[in-house]
Amino acid sequence: MKGGIPVTVKRTLDSSKVKEAARAIIMEEGFNTLTFKNLAKRLDIRSQSLYNYYHNLDDLLEQLGADFMAELYRRLVDKLPGLSGKQALRVFAQTSHEFFDQQGPLVQLVYYLKTYANDTDFVKNTERVLKLLRQLVNLAPLETMRSEEYVDVLISSVFGYSVLEIMGLLKGSRSAREESFQRLINLQLREVRELS
């Protein structure tokens, strides 16, 4: 109260603040702890208020996934200009791996991709990343594999290794895992002929 008059504090909550709080919960407490109840508690609001921003938890996860893949795409596009062949594919793999490592538990968003329709931003942004890889592969001469096969193998290697690493299923020190990832990428890049 100020001078006998109640003072109300106006909240400035919006969808981006809700997403940030959701990201914080996932990073600090784990993916499975993200619920509207926990999110509302963190934001100090009633859980019903969250429906003003997202239809349900799946809607929120879709938006988090869309942001996640959009950021990966942005980082790739920032690092790839002027590169081609093996060098471009190595940068794609390394940048993706580093990004996944930095995102920690948020990587689990990728597991939910299959549950969303093709017209969602999450799926569209994932397709942008894959289209970028396809373009890089189409410009790289391959020894024996077809381009689409190679895209599947490389993306599976990079994403799969990164996810297993984040889940704690790969043993060894951080430096040993990084060395192992580099060997995996070197193995995949043997399929790419050197540009003349």
Image (tube, helix red, strand yellow):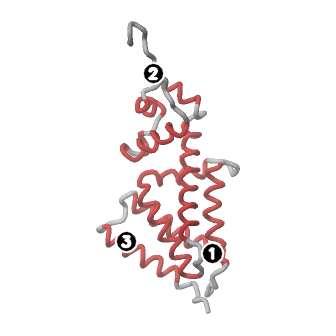
Which residue is tagged 3? Answer: 178
Is disc 1 surrounded by few (<14), some (14 to 19) or many (20+) residues within 10 Å? many
* Percent position of residue 101, x then y: 42, 61
CB within 8 Å, label 2 to label 3:
no
Q: Residue at x 55, y 66 (%)?
A: 78
Which residue is tagged 1? Answer: 136
Secondary structure of the residue carrying tag 2 is loop
Q: Is residue 13 above or below residue 145?
A: above
Label 1 or label 3, whichever lies nearer to me, is 1
Relative to the observer, which residue lies in front, 21 or 109?
21
Sequence-wise, which precedes: disc 1 or disc 2? 2
Which residue is tagged 2? Answer: 9
Q: Is residue 37 above or below residue 125?
A: above
Side (left or right) of 23 relative to 144: left
Q: Residue at x 54, y 46 (%)?
A: 64
CB within 8 Å, label 1 to label 2:
no
* Percent position of residue 24, x then y: 41, 43
The image's mark for residue 89 is none
Secondary structure of the residue carrying tag 1 is helix
Tell which residue pokes out farthest to the bottom in this image: 196
Q: Is residue 146 above or below residue 46?
A: below
Relative to the observer, which residue lies in front, 164 or 26?
26
Label 2 or label 3, whichever lies nearer to me, is 2
In three-dimensional space, the C-alpha distance between marks 2 and 3, rounded to whole angstroms, equals 49 Å
CB within 8 Å, label 1 to label 3:
no
Q: Say which amino acid is labelled 3.
A: Glu
In three-dimensional space, the C-alpha distance between marks 1 and 2, rounded to whole angstroms, equals 52 Å
